[in-house]
Amino acid sequence: MDHQLYKIAIKKPNKAHANNAGLVLYFTKGDEFTPNGQWISYSYNYHPSNAIYWTMLPDNPEKIETEDEASDRAMNDLLKQAFTNVEHRVAMYSTVKLVWDTARRFFDGRK
């Protein structure tokens, strides 16, 4: 994929140029620590003082749900379907969570 490089002195990035995290990719001129310069992602509206170029970044990927997060979501969805009363769900949550996690460990062979 080709990326258009823009001189920051000529064109500054705006929100439309930022990815879904509000970042663009800047190239900074060299200094004592990075004599050849370096690429750094930073906010579109506050660029590094030594930035000389910028380009757009792709959007960050969606967060991948962990196995534990998926299990918690499934348990909460089941509780919401089975018990419409919020107070009842809250009252039984800790017990259901303990049984849910214990059963999951047992069936996954993690005892």
Image: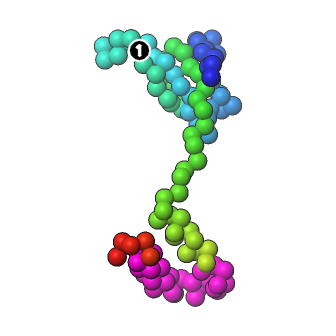
Hey, what amino acid is under mark 1? Gly
| Residue 38 visible here | yes
**Residue 31: where, in percent of width, then height?**
35, 13
Question: Magenta stretch containing residue 86, yes or no?
Answer: yes
Please tell me which residue lies in front, 33 or 4. 4
Q: Which quadrant of the figure has residue 43?
A: top right
Q: Which quadrant of the figure has residue 88?
A: bottom right
Please tell me which residue lies in front, 36 or 77. 77
Please tell me which residue lies in front, 103 or 75. 103
**Residue 7: where, in percent of width, then height?**
58, 12
Q: Is residue 3 left or right of residue 38?
A: right
Question: Is residue 80 positioned above or below 64 on the image?
Answer: below
SS assignment at label 1: loop
Point 53% across, 57% down: residue: 65
Q: Which quadrant does the N terminus fall into? A: top right
Furthest-left residue in this view: 32
**Residue 71: where, in percent of width, then height?**
51, 69
Please tell me which residue lies in front, 91 or 99. 99
Q: Is residue 104 left or right of residue 73?
A: left
Question: Is residue 46 positioned above or below 28 on the image?
Answer: below
Crowding around mark 1 (Cα neighbors within 10 Å: few <14, some 14 to 19, many 20+) is: some
The region drawn magenta spans: 79-106
Point 35% across, 16% down: residue: 34
Residue that carries the numbered disc 1 in the rendered image: 37
**Residue 94: where, in percent of width, then height?**
45, 82
Point 51% across, 87% down: residue: 91
